[in-house]
Image (cartoon, rainbow, N blue to C red):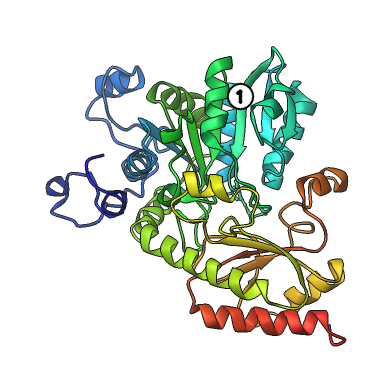
Amino acid sequence: MDKHLETRIIHSHFDQERHYGSLTQPLYQTSTFVFGNAEEGERRFAGEEEGYMYTRLGNPTVAELEHKMADLEATESAVAFASGMGAVSAVLMHLLNSGDHVIVTRGVYGCTYGFLELFRDKYGLTYDLIHMDDESSLEQVLVPETKVIYVETPINPTMKVVDLEMVTAFAKKHGLKVVVDNTFSSPYLQQPSLSGADFILHSATKYISGHGDVIAGIVCGPKEDMDIIRMSTLKDIGAVLGPFDAWLLLRGIKTLGVRMDRHCENAAFLFDKLKQADGVTSIIYPGDSSFPDHKITQKQMRKPGGMISFEIDGGKKAAQSFLNHLKLCKRAVSLGDAETLIQHPASMTHAVVPEEERLKMGINDSLIRISAGLEHKEDIWADIRQSLLAATTQEG
Ligand code: 3LM
């Protein structure tokens, strides 16, 4: 924790001398580990001796990633998963029992919503989706069974920003745990643990990887909880990250800082252009000084991020036509990659959310989400501009 984040992103803590001076972390592409003798195996399984046993229970390359992420999120420990949803489900299963209640930001990622629905139907979990504008919004849904506040900020895809200090102060007062999905920001833009959050998770598929070639998740938090998660929801449910994917993430993380700066710069540029464009009825971007959560964004984020959403004139037909006319930007879900990715939340990332709830989340058929890539900003804009023109004129 002594060096700047930009430096810690790059440098590793692993002992290079023990690995022939290798600059990068070795890839331990193995499923199992050989014991020196039977007693050593017994001691390791009994937890009396440090050491690896089987990659589902731990692997040195995966452990490097976990150390790195715990350091960047300023938490004691971290556990990696095979997907962001592996991380979301593991932390919620760890913290909640059947009958418990969780308060959730309205507009969470579609599959997080799907998980809440599944666990409500099967295990009696209850939840409230709310706009966490202030303490009173939380107070209104607080019940004796409430155990957790689950926050996505900025929220996917409506970019609403939640005041983390406000939420954690409320949680402390009522003995609740706060989980923050930090996927949209990455630790480079925002470190929720510094605002008092207990658990921070990522779909590491996104900015942490940065290259669109890995599906992964990570939960960062107190060592005591992470140890339990590793030996319960990870070990016994089994959403384990493979060593090669962990190695790719370690490779990707090294450029997190420079990538994030460029993503942010390109999103800001697109915002300026979209503001003046015909056929755009509204833009949602935390860097907009008239955005309702702009002040909170300035307070808790280093920069407003690389994501921007807008509404197109003409509803679903125009939105789909816009996507179909793209030539450079990719029609794809996911985010945080080098390529600019553009998707239609109502029919893609949030298609599982019933229309009524989707509209309350602010996701209508005209909404389009852009993950600004790393290309030259003028080229991204030229493509978006021609597509907008085509979709919102007769031709569309
Ligand atoms: C997407 N999101 O395009 P994985 N938390 C957040 C996320 O955005 C996501 C997850 C968790 C998208 C994926 S939609 C089919 C594609 C804020 C994923 C889950 O399990 O790694 O996909 O992460 O918005």
* Side (left or right) of 343 relative to 258: right
Residue 128: image location, x then y, percent: 74, 29
Please state which of residues 94 and 180 is positioned toward the viewer in this rendering.
Answer: 180
* Side (left or right) of 70 relative to 135: left
Residue 81: image location, x then y, percent: 50, 41
The residue that disc 1 covers is 148
As shown in the figure, which amino acid type bears the numbered disc 1? Val
Q: Is residue 238 visible?
A: no
Q: Going 61% across and 28% down the picture, which residue do you hit?
A: 149
Q: Where 261 falls versus 173 (above or below)?
A: below
Q: Can you name the residue that lies furthest to the bottom here?
A: 395
Please state which of residues 315 and 236 is positioned toward the viewer in this rendering.
Answer: 315
Q: Where 173 falls versus 6 (above or below)?
A: above
Q: Is residue 396 visible?
A: yes
User: In the figure, residue 315 lies in which quadrant?
Assistant: bottom right
Please state which of residues 95 and 257 is positioned toward the viewer in this rendering.
Answer: 257
Residue 262: image location, x then y, percent: 44, 67
Q: Going 29% across and 35% down the picture, which residue do you hit?
A: 34
Q: Is mark 1 on a helix, strand or loop?
A: strand
User: In the figure, residue 269 lies in which quadrant?
Assistant: bottom right
Residue 41: image location, x then y, percent: 30, 24
Q: Pointer 1: residues within 10 angstroms few (<14), some, or many (20+)?
A: many
Q: Can you name the residue that lies furthest to the top here?
A: 144
